[in-house]
Image (cartoon, rainbow, N blue to C red):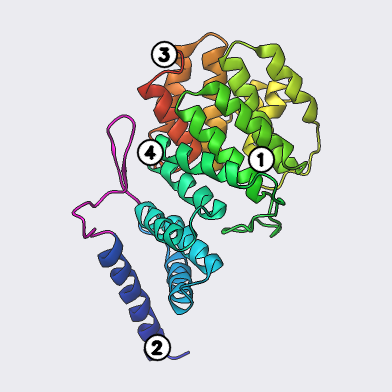
Amino acid sequence: MNKFVLYSFAFILVGCKNDFKATHFDQKDGKDFEAIGALGDTLRSSMPSDALIEKYEAKKKAFEAAPDSLDLLIWYGRFAAYAGQYRESIAIYTMGLKKFPNNSRLLRHRGHRYITLREFDKAIADLSLAAQLIQGTANKIEEDGMPNDKNIPVSSQHGNIYYHLGLAYYLDRQLLKALDSFKKCLSTSNSPDNVVAATHWIYMIQNRMGRKSAGDNYLRNITPNMDVIENTAYYKACLFYKGLLTFDEINTPDQQGGPSDTALRYAIGNWIWYIGNPQKGQEVFKEILKGDDWASFGYIAAETDLAKPYNQR
């Protein structure tokens, strides 16, 4: 490839990135941020990679070429969110719900993104309706937007609805409803990834309510050498809860960062809190908030706990 072609290709990439920035980061509604955190912080998305922008643009063009396709609309909304455009993603799903009223898949994805924006009441409304709509329907595997290393989807449509509903209730301090939702999530699939994720939240909620033996009972599903593909942070946490890993083995200083690391650190802080050292647990949560993965569930949970400690009703 000659230098002229290389320079031309680089110029095109820079142009695409600049176009994306002008379109998405200089918001037409006067807002240059995505959300306001529970502690009042203004939350902004970082610039996505060139590869992610290219995928987002491809999904957008595919939908624009076939605007009556539910699947293409969902992928367009998912990749808008992957690119950090969460409000745009919600707008896409809202548009979709006008075309496909009461569609559980659209409600599931919009509910997820309402959680990202800390609008838990709206998330609960969407996900509760989605949970009603799937009654009596067949569960299906939900394809991953960002495939794992094995390219094996690990979650289902029903499982994701109950999982995100449980999370929304948990963040809204409705612990009994959160517990019920995560139990339903656990019942949707025997996939190791589903088992460890749902069990983690069930265990934490039971302990928050002072029901340690009930939480311990759910750890019977956790065994060594489970074939967990994605939810390794939750698996490590569950192994720790069960006594199969030590605190030093999960609380390592060389963690790589990112949502998975944040999830594990939140589990550690939460455990420290409910065994009787809330001040130390709070310090862990404050460390989490020094990171920049504000859209991850561990970050949102830590932020919420700092804004309104869970023992305050």
Q: What residue sits right under mark 3 in the picture?
A: 312
Q: Distance between the residues labelled 4 and 3?
A: 19 Å
Q: How far apart are marks 4 and 1 (CA)?
A: 28 Å
Relative to 232, say whether 305 is above or below.
Answer: above
Coordinates of residue 108 in the picture (x, y in percent) = 53, 48
Q: Do the residues labelled 1 and 2 touch (CB within 8 Å)?
A: no
- Callout 2 amino acid: Lys
Q: Which residues lie in the magenta part?
A: 25-45
Q: Is mark 4 on a helix, strand or loop?
A: loop
Q: Which mark is residue 232?
A: 1
User: Which badge, 4 or 1, is on the more N-terminal residue?
Assistant: 4
Q: Which residue lies furthest to the left in this view?
A: 30
Q: What residue sits right under mark 2 in the picture?
A: 3
Position of residue 83 in the picture relative to residue 265 (left or right) = left
Relative to 157, say whether 62 is above or below.
Answer: below
Q: Are marks 1 and 3 in contact (CB under 8 Å)?
A: no
Q: Does 27 appear in magenta?
A: yes
Q: Are marks 2 and 4 in contact (CB under 8 Å)?
A: no
Q: How far apart are marks 2 and 4 (CA)?
A: 50 Å
